[in-house]
Amino acid sequence: MKKQLIALLVLVAFGASAQNTLTAEALWNLGRVSPMGITPDGKTVVYRVTTPSVAENKSSSRMFTVPVEGGVATEIKEAAGLLKDAAISPDGKYVVYDEKVKGSKVLAQDYYPALDKATVKIYEGLDYRHWDTYSDGTFNHVFYRENREDAPGTDIMKDEPFHSPTMPFGGSEDYTWSPDGKKILYVSKKSVGTAYANSTNTDIYEYDLGSGTTRNLTGENPGYDTHPVFSSQGVLAWLRMKREGYEADKNDIMVDVRGVHINLTGGWDGTVNDFTWSEDGQKIYFTAPVKGTIQLFEVNYPGLTKIALQVRQLTEGEFDVTGIVGFSGNKVILTRTDFNHAAEIFSFDLQTKGWKQLTAVNDTYYQGIQLSKWEKRWVNTTDGKKMLVWVVFPPDFDPAKKYPTLLYLQGGPQGALTQFYSFRWNFQLMAAQGYIVVAPNRRGMPGHGVEWNEEISKNWGGQVMQDYLAAIDDVARESYVDKSRLGAVGASYGGYSAYYLAGIHQNRFKTFIAHAGVFNLESMYGTTEELFFVNWDLGGAYWDKSNAAAMKTYERFNPIKHVDEWNTPMLVIHGEKDYRVPIGQGQEAFQVLQQKGIKSRFVYFTDENHWILKPQNAIVWQNEFFRWLKETL
């Protein structure tokens, strides 16, 4: 009965919005499109649609096909046989896969087998938890076996206490077959414990099936080496970040030409998201942020010739190209979003530059609601530069009226702010509730050159905060902005930004919302799991008095140092299983607010991590977000 009631409420909310504006409940009924690939003949796209169920508090998926030339989608029961199976070796003899194996003693029973009810974990190094999981002494390992179900597997990382796929988000893209099927390439960070927590040095390793030996293909590079992919001509390409410990370094496309490593994008002032080889192996297509969007680019592959490298932007418009699915003749199949539309699959003609939408999973719903409008504007920063700012308006925007306005504080801190479609930080949903959203591409965001991107590291509370204030001050001059009803909202580094601005905003804002925000840089350093991040971005440890950069960060840019100026209502949201920005950050901030007598609320998710992933929790998150704004703005 309870499930039926929840389902009925969701359907009522969804239907009620059908001729109006987006609601939180409707947002969680939209289908989420995930391309699976293109059939070998290049004629058909296979994709999955995942739909959350608020009543069941979980999601379910269905699979479909659609012709590359466009047409009616057809539901299928399984995709086996439609797509090339990358797990099978090119000669068809073997299958590669990954499994967890026990690699170190952690559990009480590892040391004391008779104490079978003990729940103790014992650690020898700092890599004892990652993202939202405590280590139990197991590791992801790559295996291969003969291509038959009953064949035994061979662990190519036998007895190694290292992960592949990499933690916490690595998958099957972390390993691949060589073109001759005689080798397996895999990505791993081969360090353990405290060294692991301080390092970003992943490498690409090559395992020889015949000899059983392994060699490091990228040992010369101290930073990230990831995503190995072979061209149709057998040339290896991968993604590389040069600097150890810098997770937001410029991401470049590397190729191996007979043992010579060539950087195809090193001379281009941008950073790569993902890439794929052209079918003939003469070019690489990739996506990258540029001026508040994500677009499709290409770079030629010259081999060892002296032909100049050329990076060209192929698409342009106010949308994000969120992924490359594959090719069909002169067409590249892509996924695309914008502030009003979740991801759908499109084809883009490389010759005519024409687009064709192939899937329309949510179009019927969109046709029944008013969509948001937005504008791109350029704002002068306090140091004399131009900053792109997205301004999103309510669907029924009337410039003769005045609207409450939200400054959106992006996370990362080096996260791109583009035409993304989030199922939580959704600008369309915020605007549909009657708010103008101001979203600045402030310092630290890719898409505006490497220098702009790097100006935030070790300077969290510096120019970037002036960028935020310049953006809201510029838009607040418009007659349609109610200057007495300004709010600032954000998560992660955006939550840090809310905490920091609360101490320096000089009464600009009437309310703040901080989700998973960093509040106390010292306790953040003491409890976060990826030490390389705080070592790079904060400048180092808080106790190292000889480190001038770190001392400036902990003294000047630490929100806890400015709480004497806090006087504005604040909603604090945090998840118990967030080990990147641990729960204590939110607890400390809420404790200050309560002790100072400032209107505040603590929304505590007992089973969520840095994100909110469960459907019913997500509905609560949205309801609390807008309830707070209604009360305080």
Image (spheres, rainbow, N blue to C red):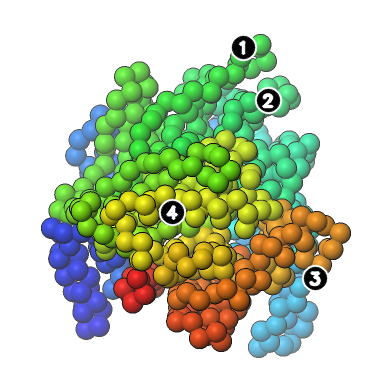
Query: Of tags 3 and 1, which is closer to the observer?
Result: 1
Q: Are marks 1 and 4 in contact (CB under 8 Å)?
A: no
Within 10 angstroms of label 3, few (less than 14), some, or many (20 or more) residues?
A: few
Query: Which quarter of the picture shows residue 198?
Result: bottom right
Which of the marked residues, 1 or 2, is nearer the chain's N terminus? Answer: 2
> Which residue occupies 44% across, 31% down?
296
Q: What residue would you read off at disc 4?
A: 473
Which image quadrant: the N terminus? Answer: bottom left
Q: What's the distance in space between the residues labelled 3 and 1, CA to CA?
A: 52 Å
The number of discs equals 4
Within 10 angstroms of label 1, few (less than 14), some, or many (20 or more) residues?
A: few
Residue 321 relative to residue 266: left or right: left
Residue 299 relative to residue 354: left or right: right
What amino acid type should be assigned to the residue bearing mark 2?
Ile
Q: What's the distance in space between the residues labelled 1 and 4, CA to CA?
A: 49 Å
Q: What residue would you read off at disc 3?
A: 124
Hey, which residue is sitting farthest top in the picture?
Answer: 306
Residue 307 relative to residue 55: left or right: right
Q: What residue would you read off at disc 2?
A: 262
Camera-nearest residue between 585 and 355:
585
Which image quadrant: the C terminus? Answer: bottom left
Camera-nearest residue between 77 and 176:
176
From this view, report whether residue 77 is shown above or below residue 608.
above
Q: Secondary structure at mark 3?
A: loop
Q: What residue would you read off at disc 1?
A: 307
Q: What's the distance in space between the residues labelled 4 and 3, CA to CA?
A: 51 Å
Horizontal and vertical percent for residue 557?
Answer: 66, 62
Q: Are marks 3 and 2 in contact (CB under 8 Å)?
A: no
